[in-house]
Amino acid sequence: MKLCLIQSRVSVAQNRHALLLGKPKALFFRKLRNIVFQDERHLKAHPAFNWLNAVSEAESRGDSTIGQSVHKAVVEETYTLAHNVITSTEPSSAVGLTLHEEGEVSFRVWAPHAAGVSILLQDKLLDVPLSRQGDFWAARLIPGCLTKGTAYKVLIHTPDGRRLYRRDPYAKSTEYTSEWCFVDDPDTFEWSEHALRPFEEVIIYEMHVGSFTPEGTLASAMAKLDYLADLGFTQVQLMPLTEHSDAWGYNPRQLMALHGAYGTPDDLRRFVDRAHQLNMGVIIDVVLHHGAVEGNALWEYDGWGPDWNGGIYHEGGHDTTWGRAFGFWKREVRDMIEEACQMWLRDYKCDGLRFDSANDLPPEVVQEVTWRLREAFPGRILTAEVTPENPMSVKQLGFDSVWVHSGYFDIIQQHRALGRGHHGGGDWAAGWDLPRLRTVMVLHYGFENPTQCIKYLLGSHDQVGCRKGGAWYKDYEMIGGQHRYAVDQYGGGRTDPHATASARLWYAANVAAAGLPMMFMGTEFAQGGWWDIDEHRRLQWSQSEDPIGQHMIAAVRAANKLRHEHVALRRGWANILHEDRPNGVVAFERVYEGLPRMVCVINAGRNSFQSGDYGCWVGGGTFEEVYNSHDPEFGGWDGVKTNGGEPKPSYDGKLWLNLPGQCTLIFKQLA
């Protein structure tokens, strides 16, 4: 019988005790981690036992957590060596834990340098030894050993006599502060019927679950899905959900475990299922190119890791800005990467993936993964962040669509050039640089279909989010150096009518432009400042209820509805029709054979033409105004003349318009 001090991650408890009891005690705690006690008498005789009792007394004097957390982190239960629960040691192909229909459980783990490997079953206090299968260790267990929700972890014996407690790298659910993993059984969930939507119908809402609601959970976010469906969004893109050690989710501790603070695997299934009931899809942001700097569950996994190479999962990987890259040259690592993608589409029935910083992944790995995903899950959208955007990502790497960063920066630079926003500046006083804006509206060079580009003219989490408390960024120097919501980039914030007018006009342009529109959470009600996860910078739902927020919500809803109603805005080819550099006016058409032509006129400048005397070249035809970003319902300015009410014929190839300043107008051709 053995009572052990946990070797696993107790850093949270240790750091808390260092603050409460002093640095020497924290150092003492670290030295105790590897001590193994032969029996209870031996444990009680050790000075650590008296110290732990003292901590418990401290808890009774007012600290409600310290005693329990230390005892949980230090004293483990007694485990019985159990060969009798093994039904087979035959080689298994699946890695991780697999539940079989007849109730048996198979488990397989990669640990080539281990001298021995066991799986510990918490509820039954069993230590089940695994059999070596080349570089893997595996066993098949009798029915009932592990069921949904029960806890397990891996015990690795190293050749030099160390005992290492590890997680299952393929686990779907874990306890953040320990190595305990929890069994997930996706087959027990009952799904609603759902049909995948065509790519052309995609309108993305980007969400960070942890800061979307005050609770920061999938369950609370699910309650807001009706709101998003009412606004006309068709896909909810969730920022990384895997367990992470950073604020935003881009430092994964391992690649398949759901971040426990957000909820359970079934909570995610309920979220996806509710989205499907509302005819929305769910896209998951996956981070595959590196592991976390802190709390990396895969680091030196089986105890081997000479020269700080990171061990079996990181051997040969280079250091990145965010953490050590994986050893992509290994078949076992590639298989893990692929399973980390397939899992979201298979076990959670998600509708697509967004590959973070895909240009940091080896091209041959990306090609292999996307090919297999297409084969196994046809119709799911595979999107990627590739900087700078490159059509080869679609043509060669197998992605359906890529994020287009440049349009956002081109627009903000123009506002800065004209002395707008918080930037000051005046770099191009001669007027708007329309050639740069031209590519924002039509397809970027090399792309062949509007669905291949994802455009977010009001910003994504990268542009809106700030980890530095609002400070200046060197790499954003070209747009003033700051990460901000759109109303702060375009002017003086949400109370500045020029800023909100610009936000409305550019979102309408985004919806009409060639590409798939995307909006970051909070932008739909003109949230100001910057986004982060703290209580002051997370989503401020109160702003959605004031007049400014309600006006912006109405504008977004109407723009999304327009895109749903007019096929040409989704499928049509885009051509520039009209450019007026001094006034900052540009017009383009969306044309799809056999369907009414749509024309979008953008007046990004502040000059207003209110006498029906602004001539915009359209080439002929009669038109009806179907969207005006200065509509009073959207918070437009009082007294602004529009073109609604009656069809407008063109003369000499031009539409003669009332064209308000800082406004987007969209027309449908009638004849």
Image: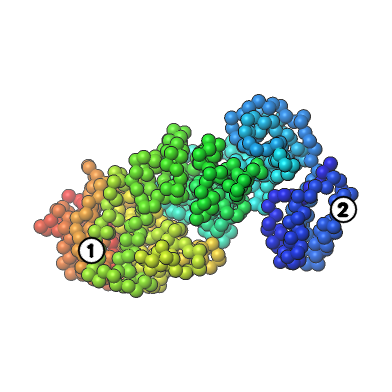
The image shows residue 219, relative to residue 127, as above or below, that is below
Q: What's the residue at 55%, 58% (across, down)?
A: 247
Q: What's the residue at 36%, 65% (across, down)?
A: 478
- Say what amino acid the circle numbered 1 marks: Val
Left or right: 221 as drawn, with respect to 406? right
Image quarter of residue 374: top left
Left or right: 340 as drawn, with respect to 633? right
Q: Earlier in the sequence, mark 1 or mark 2?
A: 2
Q: Which residue is mark 1?
A: 585
- Say what amino acid the circle numbered 2 marks: Lys
Packing grade of label 2 (10 A; few <14, some 14-19, many >=20) is few
Packing grade of label 1 (10 A; few <14, some 14-19, many >=20) is many
The image shows residue 643, relative to residue 590, as above or below, that is below
Mark 1 falls on what kind of element?
strand
Cα–Cα gap, marks 1 and 2 = 81 Å
* Residue 308 visible here: yes
Mark 2 falls on what kind of element?
helix
Q: Which residue is mark 2?
A: 44
The image shows residue 327, relative to residue 144, as above or below, that is below
